[in-house]
Image (spheres, rainbow, N blue to C red):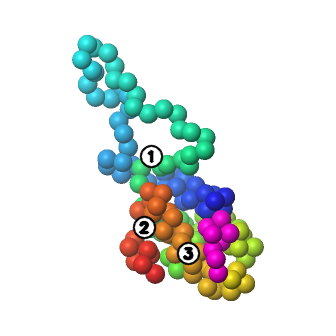
Amino acid sequence: MGLFNTLMSKIFSHASSSQPPVAGGTAPSAGAGASQPGGSAPTPQTTTPSATAPAAPAQQVDVAATLDALAQKNSEKLDWKHSIVDLMKLVGMDSSLSARKELAQDLHYSGDTNDSAAMNMWLHKEVMKKLADNGAKIPQDLLKK
């Protein structure tokens, strides 16, 4: 999922640079809290993430808040809530038909990629669903389209 991972990374990176952490969304560091019995420091519970696993955000990303904030700063009026083209533009990605066809292939679109209207609607819905599957907070109205 090359292009989808790029899209997700761009959204998550914008979120991490513009939002405070969500309460309860991160684990305490190994040095936080009381020491274990015997006076030793607590042992970290995690190891270095595998190179093959996608990087999970340290906090739940509020996609609507993140993209709305980006849209307010953008000189172009972009309707990311309804348009995959505008969503891709908003995060600085190529939104050309060929890029959208590549995204459709990444997400296993089985329809006709020459019917760009149908493909675009499917892509937007699928991207929202996949973002939610990867821990992002997505408004319910965007998941039901």
Instruction: Label the magenta part by its dominant secondary structure.
Output: loop
Where residue 17 sits: x, y (%)?
51, 51
Label 2 crowd bin: few (<14), some (14–19), many (20+), radius 10 Å: some
Image mark for residue 138: 2
**Residue 79 forms part of the magenta stretch:** no
Which element type, helix, strand or loop, lies under badge 3? helix
Asked if disc 1 and disc 3 are in contact, CB closer than 8 Å, the reply is no
Q: Residue furthest right?
A: 98
Specify which label sits upstream in the sequence, 2 or 3: 3
Q: Marks 1/3: CA distance?
A: 25 Å
Where residue 134 sits: x, y (%)?
48, 57
Q: Residue at x 71, y 73 (%)?
A: 101
Which residue is more in the foreground, 52 or 144?
Answer: 52
Where residue 89 sits: x, y (%)?
64, 70
Above or below, 27 relative to 131: above
Label 3: which residue? 124
**Residue 105 forms part of the magenta stretch:** yes
Residue extent of the magenta highlight: 104-111
Name which residue type carries label 3. Answer: His
